[in-house]
Image: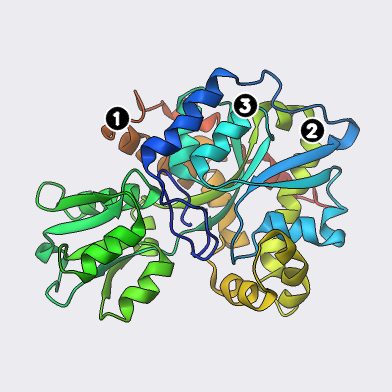
């Protein structure tokens, strides 16, 4: 996820000052997934009582005020969710979904597409119910690179959402067999390699782009450009299927209030809503306001097109297409055995909560 934080193996974005500690190696990230999968709980919905009881949500700390922190920090929003919200910090999408699978919590916020697809292809029964944001990464090049054809060696964080996006972009430019992808265990390492002239480009998150621009880096392609090609770094709200079935009204209002929160932090009263959220973020209100103002949340008008296609089904939406491309990436990387069918992918995307939210389903 997110949000002006360096992304680690299989990580969201972000999805950035919102530190996910994603500079760990992919192997290190996979260890908790394998271990916790063995002890997965049968009831991921927990023992919540009527109306949802206590709802624990895995989330990322950092500078950007995510919707989960804004809702939990503002009584007028939290009061509309029929459950007591408890936010539990996670440090990567893979680790967060491993904890979800083991029953630590039934929901995660702002987790990227590789860890979500990796989770459901390995048996975790989850559903994406709301698409939160896209990444702000970019392909930074030196002054010798005038066009994509000039690229020879590009650095990227191994196995990450950034890796997925870069390889998708290279494929779209017919450069897969012409450009060497140099895999790094951390974004700091790849940035250092670029500064030292060992590589001529890096596909890297916004926080590092800001620094590289001070060293005369030029952005050849942005995350938004690559997202238009179908290779988007998408951060989403996902819940276990069991919890969604047992507590549909709680999930409904969670979707409603997340959407509202993302609108409020971009509006004239942003300070009012961001400030109380900072108790979950670990940063000063001024820093959170600045980071949140520029963060690319998915606009309300575009939410439906991500969750479902023109025929009203999840199988034809932009998210399903993105998940299929993500699965192909995971297979080529040896991190998934097969690419799921369109129907199998659609099972893990539930647009009904958003549809109801748009037809009077919000309090």
Q: Position of residue 95 (x, y in %)?
A: 53, 38
* Crowd tier of the residue under label 1, counting other residues whose Cα lies within 10 Å: few below 14, some 14–19, many 20 or above: few
Q: Return the mark for residue 192.
A: none
Q: Return the mark for residue 247.
A: 2
Using residue 80 as the reference point, say whether residue 332 is left or right of it: left
Q: Return the mark for residue 102.
A: 3
Marks 1 and 2 sit apart, C-alpha to C-alpha, by 36 Å
Q: Which residue is mark 1?
A: 334
Q: Position of residue 284 (x, y in %)?
A: 67, 73
In this view, the mark in front (1 or 2): 1
Cβ–Cβ under 8 Å for marks 3 and 1: no
Q: Nearer the viewer, residue 256 or 139?
A: 139
At mark 3, the secondary structure is loop
Vertical position of residue 331 compared to residue 38: above or below: below
* Crowd tier of the residue under label 2, counting other residues whose Cα lies within 10 Å: few below 14, some 14–19, many 20 or above: many
Using residue 296 as the reference point, say whether residue 61 is left or right of it: right
* Crowd tier of the residue under label 3, counting other residues whose Cα lies within 10 Å: few below 14, some 14–19, many 20 or above: many
In this view, the mark in front (2 or 3): 3
Q: Nearer the viewer, residue 285 or 121?
A: 285
Quick check: can you spot residue 147? yes
Q: Residue at x 77, y 46 (%)?
A: 86
At mark 1, the secondary structure is loop
Q: Residue at x 56, y 45 (%)?
A: 307
At mark 2, the secondary structure is loop
Q: Residue at x 72, y 62 (%)?
A: 261
Q: Earlier in the sequence, mark 1 or mark 2?
A: 2
Marks 3 and 1 sit apart, C-alpha to C-alpha, by 24 Å
Marks 2 and 3 sit apart, C-alpha to C-alpha, by 19 Å
Q: Earlier in the sequence, mark 2 or mark 3?
A: 3
Quick check: can you spot residue 316? no
């Amino acid at each position: 996820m997110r949000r002006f934080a360096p992304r680690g193996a299989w990580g969201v974005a972000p999805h950035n000052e919102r530190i996910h500690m994603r500079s760990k190696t992919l192997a290190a990230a996979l260890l908790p997934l394998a271990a916790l999968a063995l002890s997965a709980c049968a009831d991921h919905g927990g023992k919540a009582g009527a109306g949802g009881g206590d709802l624990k949500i895995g989330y990322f700390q950092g500078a950007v005020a995510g919707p989960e922190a804004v809702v939990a920090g503002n009584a007028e929003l939290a009061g509309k969710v029929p459950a007591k919200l408890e936010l539990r910090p996670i440090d990567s999408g893979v680790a967060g979904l491993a904890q979800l699978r083991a029953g630590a919590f039934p929901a995660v916020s702002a987790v990227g597409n590789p860890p979500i697809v990796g989770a459901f292809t390995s048996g975790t029964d989850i559903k994406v119910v709301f698409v939160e944001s896209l990444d702000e990464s970019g392909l930074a090049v030196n002054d010798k690179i005038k066009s994509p054809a000039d690229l020879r060696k590009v650095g990227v964080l191994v196995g990450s959402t950034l890796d997925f996006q870069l390889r998708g972009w290279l494929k779209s430019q017919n450069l897969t067999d012409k450009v060497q992808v140099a895999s790094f265990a951390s974004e700091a390492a790849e940035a250092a390699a670029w500064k030292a002239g060992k590589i001529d480009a890096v596909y890297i998150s916004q926080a590092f782009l800001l620094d590289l621009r001070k060293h005369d880096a030029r952005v050849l392609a942005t995350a938004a450009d690559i997202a238009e090609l179908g290779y988007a770094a998408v951060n989403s709200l996902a819940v276990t299927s069991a919890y969604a079935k047992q507590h549909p009204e709680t999930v409904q209002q969670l979707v409603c209030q997340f959407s509202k929160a993302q609108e409020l932090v971009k509006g004239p009263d942003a300070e009012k809503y961001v400030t109380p959220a900072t108790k979950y973020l670990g940063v000063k209100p001024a820093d959170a306001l600045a980071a949140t103002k520029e963060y690319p949340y998915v606009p309300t008008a575009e939410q439906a097109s991500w969750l479902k296609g023109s025929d009203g089904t999840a199988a034809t939406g932009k998210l399903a297409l993105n998940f299929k491309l993500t699965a192909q990436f995971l297979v080529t990387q040896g991190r998934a055995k097969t690419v799921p069918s369109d129907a199998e992918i659609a099972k893990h995307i539930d647009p009904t909560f958003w549809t109801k939210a748009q037809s009077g389903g919000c309090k």
